[in-house]
Amino acid sequence: MTQVSTGSIPTQESTAKTATIHDPSKLLDVAAIKRDLEASTDLPVHWVSDFDALEACLDDLETRDRVALDTEFIKRSTYFPILALVQINTGDTIYLIDAPKLDLTEFWVVLEEMPMMIWHACGEDLGIFYLLSESPALTNVFDTQIALSYLTGQLQMGYQQALSQELDIHVEKGESQSDWLARPLTYEQECYAIDDVRYLLNLYDILHQQLVKRDLLDKVIEDCQLYTKELYEAANIEDDATYLAMADFRYTGEQLAVLQAVSSWREALARATNQPKTFILKKQAVRDVVVEFPKSIKQLTQKTTMHRSMIHLYGDELIDIINKARTLPVEEQPALVLPPYRSKDKTVSKAVNQVIKEYEAETGVPANVLMRKKWLSQLYEVVAYDLPIEDIPEGLKGWRNPWVMQTLIPLLETYKQQLKEGMRMQQEEDEL
């Protein structure tokens, strides 16, 4: 049974003696990993619900060189997620941080300065981290899901499967959608929250072993940093750039101007009223507006899927935004989106897949990790339209770059005409 304490949090003096010293270059033997795994089943658990407890926890964290983390939050009817709980495993102690009760300003700073934070599938967690802190893009994150993608080729392996596969540990995942703002949490909720970090350090250790043996650790660390940078940029995107997620190469300059204006308005309104963007306009309703150019409340009702209550509240304002966007001079409209490459002739794709397969064999990195579809599409654009080489995706500027520059781009240059033709054909087919 999980023992959860509400007090007697270890002091800095008591924890400093047992603080984990992690040497990334040192491989643990199987016996050591097994001992650590057995020890994890009996870690003491402490609730952190007041200032003194938080101070003691921070004192402990400052002695650590790595921690495992997870969060629980609610985001069903709000724009901003409500952080309910932060779980931290130091290797000696598990802390449950009662987020709604505490000022976590100093807490975020301590984590930012932590040598290593270990998460599994950290996307939403770091989204909250960046929202609530003033942290720059983090460089101390290790995501075990990314590590597993290098070892298995499975891009989104869940935590439950990872523990079962790598450690032969089974944890329940039935409380993920429960009310994490309720206090006290149920016994099942506490067990769920604790288990989310109880074995995460053990998972890291065994993955670390495999990555070092296969000479993949540096590559994984680089991709973790790339991911945290992407999450930071997504969390700090300007309102007028949010339209890019819905931009379509079939849209005219006028349509893109409307899309940009409506998307920016929706983003700002959702934030100001603290409600999900989809409560204001679902993506399909945005597309309806871009295609139909409604000029009145009646047309908004008849030609779009915008909810009637939202039309009543914001219809006039939205019509005004659409009309103003349509009057933008051509030179002020957003740049047109390039069409993707599509072709029934598989010559290019076969040649590209072959060099990817060869590099997969050379590096041991699965092909779907080595090259994302989005990256390849962007690379086609760079080559086909002679765009600056700086426009290649960020993910191809790191350890993959020598291969991209010396092998992949020279290959694509030999198919430049086919790439242009494939993009032109795609545009013509959609115009029919």
Image: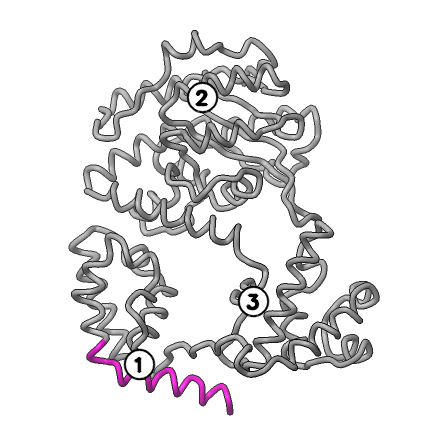
Using a 10 Å C-alpha cutoff, classify the residue at mark 3 as few (fewer than 14 neighbours), some (14 to 19) or many (20 or more).
many
Mark toward the start of the polypeptide (2 vs 3): 2
**Nearer-the-camera pick, 375 or 105:** 105
Q: Secondary structure at mark 2?
A: helix
Q: CA distance from mark 2 to mark 3?
A: 40 Å
Give the residue number, with chain letter if any, for mark 2. Answer: 61
Q: Would residue 1 be visible to someone looking at this image?
A: no
Decide: is 426 above or below 305. below
Question: Residue 203, percent across and down?
Answer: 36, 32
Q: Are marks 2 and 1 in contact (CB under 8 Å)?
A: no
Looking at the rendered structure, the kind of residue marked 1 is Leu
State the separation of the CA atoms marked 1 and 3. Answer: 26 Å
**Amino acid under disc 2:** Leu
**Residue 423 on the magenta span:** yes
Q: Amino acid at mark 3?
A: Tyr
Magenta stretch: dominant SS? helix
Q: Is residue 215 above or below residue 350?
A: above
Q: Which residues are magenta?
A: 413-432
Residue 82 picture location, percent across and down: 65, 39
Q: In 3D space, how far apart are the residues under numbered discs 2 and 1 (Cα atoms)? A: 53 Å
Mark 1 = which residue? Answer: 419
- The reply to whether discs 2 and 3 touch (Cβ–Cβ < 8 Å) is no
Q: Position of residue 212 (x, y in %)?
A: 21, 37
